[in-house]
Image (cartoon, rainbow, N blue to C red):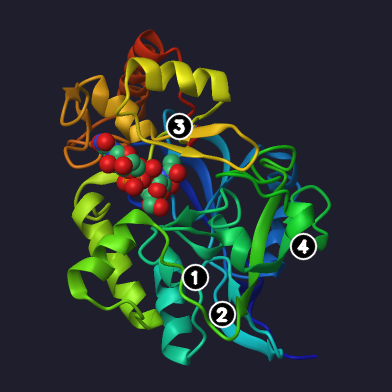
């Protein structure tokens, strides 16, 4: 039997733990118990624990898509499972795996350095690898589901590990089974990506077309696309290390063709994208901007001055203040356009 010290088998537990450092909004909240999960075995230890096994649980990744409005009386599970490797090279893809606790942007940069491009449009998205499938992150014409192979998740009641493919994950626009019927029931431990070869750039998004026009480079390599995406995001989106935020606060609403025609009739400028099924996606940032919210502050929460879709912590805000601001925005967008905006982050 290999010698193991008691601590090697023990869970890393902290009582009455501040979560302020662990959420990108910088909101104050306290977890009755914080458990760090460094390996799959730690999930089993939680499940088998007489008290922790039955306690309410909240899984925290990088904390970049959550609004904490209260203290949490149960167990906050902080996922810290690391590791990244090439699993195999197929004729038409590289299959790469990462631990759920890996930093997303670091992982994207690493795949490019290794010569396995494909994730460059998703550069600089805050958060961890394990959170990426939960809301099917997307940016600049690529969604996680377009590069997804499978993931491993563990059941928080039985401790059993399952592997789910894209169909089982039920990816939708900023949505998956992990935001629906598996919400709070599983913890994602590892994610595998399918990076198509030969690589082809995805350049159809307006902001990237502008970069092509600006630079005259119509055939950028993956590293150049990565650099462009980083520059675009830095110009528009606040760095959570400097200004607390959770990225886009609302989803872009999808409306029926009739509703879309009605809105265009009243506001011909409205930014909208036609979807294959005839419905229409509206730019929530534009709707909020049109209601005059950009740069506004309510209490200690505010609307970012370069992108109205992003709510920010102006310093010392509480989760309740962020939610109050969000409700006021929802009411004014509903009042003017008859559209209900749906928050993108998880509100606890
Ligand atoms: N717009 C305004 N005023 C604003 C903000 C936006 O008029 O204050 C207009 C823009 O001019 C543009 C349109 O709205 O014509 C769309 O804006 P943008 O291209 O910045 O994208 P978005 O729809 O606001 C979405 C994602 C982002 C992602 C970008 C790029 C959602 C909810 N958000 O934002 O994702 O980075 O596209 O692909 O789908 C995130 O989810 O946290 C996120 C940042």
What residue is rendered at 68% in x and 39% in y?
A: 55
**Where is mark 4, residue-wise?**
165
Q: Which residue is mark 2?
A: 83
Sequence order check: which comes first, mark 2 or mark 4? 2
Within-10-Å neighbours for mark 1: few <14, some 14–19, many 20+: many
Please identify, in this view, whether the residue under mark 4 or under mark 1 is nearer the observer: 4
Give the CA distance from mark 3 to mark 4: 34 Å
Q: Is mark 3 within 8 Å of ligand 1?
A: no
Query: What residue do we see at 27% from left, 70% from top?
Result: 212
Within the displayed image, which quadrant is ligand 1 positioned in?
Answer: top left
Local packing at callout 3 (Cα closer than 10 Å; few below 14, some 14-19, many 20+) is some
- Disc 4 Cβ-to-ligand 1 distance below 8 Å: no
**Residue contact between numbered discs 2 and 4, judged by CB atoms under 8 Å:** no
Residue 50 percent location from the top left of the image:
76, 47
Looking at the image, which is closer to me, 280 or 4? 280
Q: Which element carries disc 1, helix, strand or loop?
A: loop
Mark 4 element type: strand
Give the mark toward the camera: 3 or 4. Answer: 4
Residue at which label 1 appears: 102
From the Cβ of disc 2, is ligand 1 less than 8 Å away? no
Which disc, if any, is residue 71? 3
Q: Please, is residue 196 above or below residue 141 in the view?
A: below
């Amino acid at each position: 039997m290999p010698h193991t010290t008691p601590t090697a088998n023990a869970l890393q537990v902290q009582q009455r733990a501040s979560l302020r450092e662990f959420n990108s909004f910088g909101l104050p909240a306290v977890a009755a118990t914080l458990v760090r999960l460094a390996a799959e075995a730690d999930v089993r230890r939680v499940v088998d624990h007489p008290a922790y096994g039955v306690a309410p649980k909240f899984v925290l990744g990088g904390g970049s898509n959550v609004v904490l409005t209260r203290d949490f009386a149960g167990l906050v599970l902080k996922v810290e499972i690391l590791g990244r490797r090439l699993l195999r090279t197929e004729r038409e893809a590289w299959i790469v795996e990462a631990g759920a606790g890996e930093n997303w942007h670091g992982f994207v940069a690493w795949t490019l350095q290794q010569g396995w491009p494909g994730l460059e449009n998703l550069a600089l998205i805050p958060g961890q690898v394990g959170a990426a499938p939960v809301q099917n992150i997307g940016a600049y014409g690529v969604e996680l589901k377009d590069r997804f192979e499978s993931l491993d998740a563990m059941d928080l009641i039985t401790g059993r590990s399952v592997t789910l493919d894209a169909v089982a994950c039920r990816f939708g626009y900023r949505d998956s089974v992990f935001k629906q019927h598996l919400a709070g029931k599983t913890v994602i431990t590892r994610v595998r990506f399918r990076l198509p070869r030969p690589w082809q750039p995805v350049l159809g998004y307006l902001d990237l077309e502008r970069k092509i026009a600006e630079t005259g480079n119509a055939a950028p390599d993956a590293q150049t696309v990565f650099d462009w995406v980083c520059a675009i995001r830095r110009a528009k989106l606040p760095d959570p290390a400097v200004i607390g935020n959770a990225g886009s606060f609302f989803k872009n609403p999808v409306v029926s063709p009739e509703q879309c025609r009605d809105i265009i009739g009243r506001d011909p400028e409205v930014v909208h994208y036609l979807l294959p099924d005839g419905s229409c996606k509206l730019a929530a940032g534009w709707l909020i901007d049109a209601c005059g919210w950009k740069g506004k502050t309510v209490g200690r929460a505010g609307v970012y001055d370069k992108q109205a879709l992003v709510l920010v912590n102006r310093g010392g805000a509480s989760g309740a203040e962020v939610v109050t601001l969000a409700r006021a925005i929802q009411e004014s967008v509903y009042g003017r356009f008859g559209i209900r905006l749906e928050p993108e982050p998880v509100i606890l």
